[in-house]
Image (spheres, grey):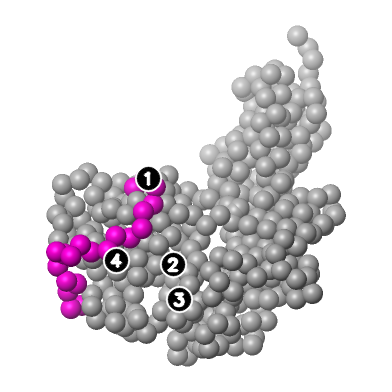
Amino acid sequence: MPTLARVIVPVVAAALIGGCALADRPATATPLPVPAPAAASPAPDAELAEAMARWSKVEKAGFGYTVESGISGLSGTTDRVIGIEGHWERVAIQISSFSGWGDEQVTVPGMFGLMQAIRGRTGTIQATYDPVFGYPATIDRTEPSASDGDWSMRVVDFRSSLDTPATDGGLATRLGDARAAWTRWAPSDYTYEWQQVASRDGNKPAAAWSIRHVDGVTTATQTVGDGAIVGQEAASIPATFDAIETAMKSGAWVDAVFDPVLGRPIVVGIDPSPAVGDSWWIKIAFHDIVAQTGRAELQAAHDRWIVQRPKRYSYVWREVGGGRHWTYRVAMNGEVAKIRASGGAPVGEAATLAPRIDDLFMLIEEALANGGHVDAAYEEQFGYPTRVKIDAPGSLVVGTITIRSMVIDATP
């Protein structure tokens, strides 16, 4: 798959992403329902019919899978789809510059319907199906008459409550990693909407809490339900981690999507037993106040630096993280830098990041643009970063950079 641009969902923070018009290929138009085949359309071939029959025995189970898709010449999308008792949730973990598939199109029935809808048109469509559960393992569409008419879909990492032997699909490991990430990178100020939704009620929450954590103080307002049944404690991020672990230990089928940076749960599906009507979702729509204010503070600080940047100045750059503990002493004269590195610290082309303040601003901007977590402080007058803590996908630096011992040469 091509490199994907990262978007945190909710909050994406946790926004569930819709997107692509139902046509022969992904597009940026408003999503439309999957069209039923016209009366004159050819009947599905025997292979597709057999696959649909196999899938009909799975629909009420608990299952999760990832859809990887791409369109010729563009970056692709990655979506995690979770189903419990015939109800679906979809999280766009990463999205490209085009809007991707609509929610209904990444369901298994939606993929079947998509193939039926375009059957008989120009071009070709080829598919393979899982021999046990019938879901489309691969779909490849070729349309020579259109420059961007080729696209593909792949279903990977499929797991269900019907698996024998049962498997957690690596969920225990992902849960542990997510907990560690939340402990390490949880923003100091944030709000979120926490919902528990019974599968039979679709999107209607049985309980919902609005949580606000600012300046070390947490306040909570229950917006749906009875606090005696689902209390404030259950709506915390740590308690949601605990709910996943408890369900796994009890033998329930569980799948979850976690934020790749902060680790917080985005969507959790829990199906305790084969009986119908006992499953539920937990959904968290998260708003990182630190990230929002961080972008505004970055812009203001960068503006101050551009306007007031001195011609000659010197400072100490210290970089800690990822097994590194490097120090650079930097003297700037206009655009010319004299750099003295501590033992073992790379310089020049060997360095992943030049220890210059302009490069540090660039690093912060890229980390935020990629949905990373940045905690930064800036000097009041000149605006240069004094301390930056970064965790971001693909970042040149993961860890903490400090700028200290700044000396401004005021000589004309």
Counting from the top left corner in percent of width and height, residue 10 is at 60, 53
- Residue 243: quarter of image: bottom right
First to last magenta residue range: 27-47
Q: Residue at x 58, y 83 (%)?
A: 278
369 on left or right of 47: right
The amino acid beneath tag 4 is: Gly
Q: Residues within 10 Å of mark 2 (few under 14, many from 20)?
A: many
Q: Residue at x 64, y 82 (%)?
A: 247
Counting from the top left corner in percent of width and height, residue 332 is at 68, 24
The mark nearer the N terminus, 3 or 1, is 1
Give the residue at mark 1.
28
55 on left or right of 47: right
The mark nearer the N terminus, 2 or 4, is 2
The amino acid beneath tag 2 is: Thr
The mark nearer the N terminus, 3 or 2, is 2
Which of discs 3 and 2 lies nearer the camera? The answer is 3
The mark nearer the N terminus, 4 or 1, is 1
- Residue 303: quarter of image: top right
Which of discs 1 and 2 lies nearer the camera? The answer is 1
Mark pair 3, 4: CA separation: 16 Å
Give the residue at mark 3.
86
Counting from the top left corner in percent of width and height, residue 349 is at 53, 39
Q: Residue at x 32, y 54 (%)?
A: 22
The mark nearer the N terminus, 3 or 4, is 3
Q: Secondary structure at mark 1?
A: loop
